[in-house]
Image: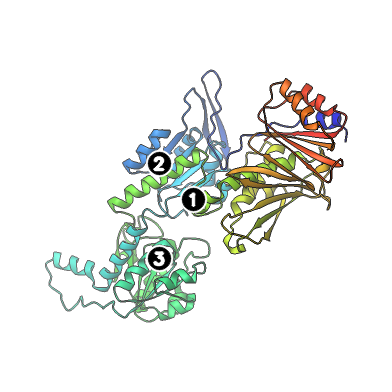
Amino acid sequence: MSASASSTMLLSSKPSRASRASLSWKNHLSSTSAFNISSISLRHRRYPRFIVLSMDAKPTVLVAEKLGEAGLKLLKEFANVDCSYNLSPEELCTKISLCDALVVRSGTKVSREIFESSGGRLKVVGRAGVGIDNVDLAAATEHGCLVVNAPTANTVAAAEHGIALLTAMARNVAQADASIKAGKWLRNKYVGVSLVGKTLAVMGFGKVGSEVARRAKGLGMHVIAHDPYAPADRARAIGVELVSFDEALASADFISLHMPLTPATKKILNDETFAKMKKGVRIVNVARGGVIDEDALVRALDAGIVAQAALDVFTVEPPPKDSKLIQHENVTATPHLGASTTEAQEGVAIEVAEAVVGALKGELSATAVNAPMLPAEVLSELKPFVVLAEKLGRLAVQLVAGGSGVKSVKVSYGSARAPDDLDTRLLRAMIIKGVIEPISSVFINLVNADFTAKQRGLQISEERILLDGSPESPVEFIQVQIANVESKFASAISDSGEIRVEGRVKDGVPHLTKVGSFEVDVSLEGSIILCSQVDQPGMIGKVGSVLGEENVNVSFMTVGRIAPRKQAVMAIGVDEQPSKESLKRIGEIPAIQEFVYLGL
């Protein structure tokens, strides 16, 4: 390809967006304020849709359920906060197009209609608590909305409540209290059972389940657990044996439920599973009401299969006043108090507020539930590689010649770490972001990356290359290849025929280290000019002079070559975009065969 042809193609390239490591709130304002009301139709219903343009640079956060003051204070320091409680679904659909973030507890259903009504403005939903079954995650993901929760602040409170229900049930505390307040003295009726030596089956060995197990061990109970995703070493560390679902049911004197409500766990305790339990088993549920078939539980209580149940959660909350389950004499019930301690409420408010504000700022969230889920320390460790991954994706796709459809991308990670010790989901998401955004109008974030790639027929394959050396760094290099396409810069084609770019992180800064088969070393802090040339003296000076005359600052310049005086690739990092005239002059330098400007 000639230099002039290359220049024409590159100058018609769409400017790249700012490269952020996750979704961020962006303010698009006109120079004047405007107010417009239109309407949108959703499933044959119409809701007003408000579009507001103002000079206020703050995002708007709608708090739809009561939140602790400490959390509200954090939100108000960053955003305009609208506290509107007890909204109907229709009212929420109307308000949501004015909001960048929504904060809810368990009482507000964040349905697909909410995301559709937002018109794309809603970027974050914060769930003040652990469970997210009241949020339509599929719809959130499709609309590019991050969902964050507060999974740690109420862990101890929920575990303590589980233990409180366990002991109260075993000793008939609630029934005896009601009896004595009614003027009765029935010591013989309320004889309880001891916990020491009894087997407790913890169903769901996550944060709350494991804390319940610790406390039950302290009460002298034998604790077993079932959780298909729990690591065995964590269970062994606190003296808990992981068993199968059926074994847990058959062995337990007490069962404590701590599983999320999913299609797989809905009504997981039913007539069939109750029949597998020991006669006289006692059940505690501080997880989700829907995991128990409540009608089946009443039958099991009446039949004596289940001796007692202690319940903090229900399928419908609040439950009907005439509920047979609530009124059953062998049931102890509390109104969803698992997280209801003063300390937990403040902790949840702070945790969800920090997550929402961080997401609106464009920061990576360790509590995202519909994005790659990684611990905070892993996010911190991967942060410079996240930037590298996105920029390599942007470089690779800009090297594709016009008219070539990108259908498959291969990503290789070079690392000295074992495969199980390198989670690449976040890096993959950012490569997708880098590949798709420069060639489409879609805004890609960590939430909708995989969904958008699949929707567009883009296949992402990953390869891990195990290297010798220290595993201190999670990744030594990342390589991105695009196959079955033509390139606007022929030297970017590898020996095996794909567009190939490779990069590393050096001192916390992403660097481009290979283009095609040529070794280079240029910082990815600005943009890049790649020149294919015949290696000869004075080339760096000639190109540098052209850029210097236009006051374009050169941050890095490096040359990769096959051999002296043979084919070479010059990579030049620039802080500003050169003019068309400057690029044309670079292309007219006799030894330069082709060049391309790549915006980052």
* Label 1 secondary element: loop
Vertical position of residue 468 compared to residue 582: above or below: below
Residue shown at the point (31%, 66%) measured from the top left: 163
Q: Residue at x 37, y 58 (%)?
A: 155
Residue annotated with mark 3: 209
| Amino acid at circle 2 | Ala
Question: What amino acid is labelled 1 in the image?
Answer: Ala
Residue 136 in sight here: no
* Mark toward the viewer: 2 or 3: 3
Give the secondary structure at mark 3: helix
How far apart, in angstroms, are the residues tagged by discs 1 and 2? Answer: 23 Å
Instruction: Say above or below: 28 vs 249.
Output: above
Q: State how many labels appear.
A: 3
Q: x, y percentage for residue 36?
A: 53, 24
Point out which mark residue 366 bears: 1
Q: Mark 2 — residue?
A: 64
Residue 301 seen anywhere in this rendered image of the structure: yes
Image depth: mark 1 or mark 3 in front: 1
Residue contact at pointers 2 and 3, CB within 8 angstroms: no
Give the vertical position of 244 relative to 41 (above or below): below
* Mark 2 to mark 3 CA distance (whole Å): 29 Å
Question: Residue 24 placed where, x, y %?
Answer: 54, 38
Left or right of 563: which side holds 358? left
Position of residue 588 relative to residue 600, above or below, is above
Which residue type does callout 3 highlight? Gly
